[in-house]
């Protein structure tokens, strides 16, 4: 999908969906700003500090991963390293087959989306159950998440009520409390049936081996309380140096993601059940997923691996808000997805998604809200340069519109002529051109009146005023 195709995708989105995304994204922006400014005199200093902690971890990732493995193993957990999503899937299948379970409960995990895990487990004859309410609706609909924190940001409660009715979870009722009660009743039996539960990890401490998982619904905790086997699937970038770093990173993650000061549940899982630790699953497996991350560590794109998956850059991004997460056609949408997607695709898959780096206005809103200070526009510019270098995307000078611009910019007389002729645009019936993409463009925008040459006039006037003193 080229940038034009992303525009076309956006143009085809129903207004109800766009409205749902706008409401969800705006509430994320407002709540984040309110809690950060109320709670911290200098939130930017904290963002810089968190960025340094994350970058330091990446700069010493080998050491911290080895330390996390050693601590987890000493607590009785089994640690695995998967080079690719397919290898991680094989490991998960081995573990669930050995457990004898059919039902598997799952907390929300973006790493599991990289494996397309729910679909793949279903194909293998298992019954995976997404227990995060948003992900549960995604599963009912055979859909994909369109936001990393709010997977059904593109749906409203009427959509959800229709999904529940279609899937036999009661007659149509769009009361949120009724919907939640029905989901809870359905999931309770599944929690009790599942011998295996899966979570992601928001962070894994290299110092203690503790796995931090945050939820607002208590679904991870219920899964851990009921199952015999706990599988953690986490990218290798989820390691942090010390337990005390959680204070900083969780504070920023939660405020940036949901505008809360703390989520309803924060699990710190130290290992499986032992004689001196009588609760929790009897077996714990931690699968560290590489999937091209190690090729990014140490490169000039490494800062994207600081990402703590808060979703704030999506909420703030004007392109995301008009195109939806699905337009990015990968696991990770929005500005961070436009960087991470092409990198995780590896050298072989880069060309297919390199165009995502062009889905940006370079307004910088993503950089300004990022809790770990990732310079997303700089990374997008590097990706654009790479795609031109590798011949994946034409240099802008090779694109017809840019070639025309270059011709005018190099010839002042032609430029002045074009500026004068541009007034014609004010009179042309552009909205009636027989091109769907142009009509769609004008549906949501009004072209300002032509002011060609005004900039030069203003500069000349400014100079004269300066000379006149
Ligand atoms: S790039 Fe920054 S703002 Fe975007 S999801 Fe990651 S941490 Fe959040």
Image (tube, rainbow, N blue to C red):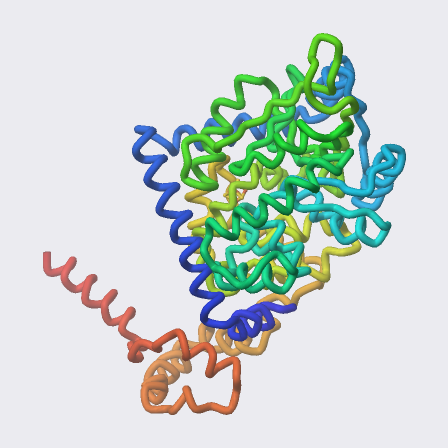
Q: Nearer the viewer, residue 114 or 424?
A: 114
Q: Residue at x 69, y 42 (%)?
A: 111
Residue 388 seen by the camera: no
Which residue is situated farthest in the top direction here? Answer: 276
Q: Position of residue 230 (x, y in %)?
A: 74, 30
Q: Residue at x 47, y 90 (%)?
A: 433
The tally of labels here is: 0
Q: Position of residue 255 (x, y in %)?
A: 43, 36
Q: Nearer the viewer, residue 332 or 93?
A: 93
Q: Position of residue 465 (x, y in %)?
A: 14, 61
Q: Quadrant of the C terminus?
A: bottom left
Q: Is residue 300 above or below residue 358?
A: above
Q: Residue at x 41, y 87 (%)?
A: 430
Q: Is residue 403 left or right of residue 30?
A: right
Q: Position of residue 457 (x, y in %)?
A: 24, 71
Q: Is residue 209 above or below residue 450?
A: above
Q: Nearer the viewer, residue 18 or 124?
A: 124
Q: Quadrant of the N terminus?
A: bottom right
Which residue is situated farthest in the front direction here? Answer: 171
Q: Is residue 449 left or right of residue 87?
A: left
Q: Is residue 173 left or right of residue 65?
A: left
Q: Nearer the viewer, residue 425 or 81?
A: 81
Q: Is residue 414 above or below residue 29?
A: below
Residue 449 seen by the camera: yes
Q: Name the image quarter holding residue 33.
A: top left
Q: Name the image quarter holding residue 385.
A: bottom right
Q: Residue at x 29, y 76 (%)?
A: 451
Q: Is residue 217 above or below residue 337?
A: above
């Amino acid at each position: 999908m080229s940038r034009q195709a992303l525009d076309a995708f956006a143009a085809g989105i129903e207004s109800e969906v766009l409205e749902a995304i706008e409401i969800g994204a705006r509430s994320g922006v407002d709540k984040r700003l309110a809690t950060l400014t109320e709670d911290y005199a200098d939130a930017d200093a904290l963002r810089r500090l968190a960025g340094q902690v994350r970058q330091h971890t990446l700069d010493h990732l080998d050491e911290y991963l080895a330390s996390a493995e050693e601590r987890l193993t000493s607590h009785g957990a089994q640690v695995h390293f998967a080079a690719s999503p397919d290898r991680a899937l094989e490991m998960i299948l081995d573990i669930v087959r050995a457990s004898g379970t059919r039902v598997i409960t799952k907390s929300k995990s973006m790493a599991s989306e990289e494996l397309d895990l729910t679909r793949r487990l279903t194909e293998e004859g298992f019954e995976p159950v997404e227990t995060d309410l948003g992900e549960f609706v995604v599963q009912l609909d055979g859909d994909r998440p369109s936001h990393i924190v709010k997977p059904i940001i593109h749906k409203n409660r009427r959509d959800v009520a229709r999904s529940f009715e279609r899937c036999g979870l009661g007659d149509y009722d769009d009361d949120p409390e009724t919907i939640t009660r029905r989901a809870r009743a359905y999931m309770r039996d599944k929690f009790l049936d599942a011998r295996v539960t899966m979570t992601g990890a928001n962070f894994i401490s290299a110092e203690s081996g503790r796995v931090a998982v945050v939820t607002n619904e208590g679904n991870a905790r219920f899964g851990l309380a009921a199952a015999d086997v706990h599988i953690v699937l986490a990218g290798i970038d989820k390691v942090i140096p010390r337990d005390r770093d959680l204070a900083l990173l969780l504070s920023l993650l939660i405020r940036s993601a949901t505008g809360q000061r703390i989520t309803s549940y924060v699990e710190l899982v130290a290992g499986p059940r032992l004689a001196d630790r009588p609760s929790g699953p009897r077996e714990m497996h931690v699968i560290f997923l590489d999937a091209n991350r190690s090729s990014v560590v140490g490169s000039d794109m490494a800062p994207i691996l600081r990402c703590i998956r808060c979703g704030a850059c999506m909420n703030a991004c004007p392109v995301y808000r008009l195109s939806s997460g699905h337009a990015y056609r990968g696991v990770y949408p929005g500005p961070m997805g436009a960087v991470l997607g092409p990198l995780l695709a590896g050298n072989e898959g880069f060309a297919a998604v390199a165009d995502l780096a062009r889905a940006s206005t370079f307004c910088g809103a993503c950089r300004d809200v990022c809790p770990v200070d990732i310079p997303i526009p700089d990374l997008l510019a590097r990706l654009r340069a790479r795609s031109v270098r590798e011949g994946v995307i034409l240099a802008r000078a090779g694109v017809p519109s840019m070639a025309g611009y270059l011709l005018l910019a190099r010839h002042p007389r032609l430029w002045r002529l074009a500026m004068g002729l541009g007034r014609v645009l004010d009179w042309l019936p552009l909205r009636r051109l027989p091109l769907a993409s142009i009509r769609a463009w004008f549906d949501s925008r009004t072209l300002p009146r032509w002011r060609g040459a005004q900039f030069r006039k203003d500069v000349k006037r400014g100079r004269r005023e300066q000379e006149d003193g």
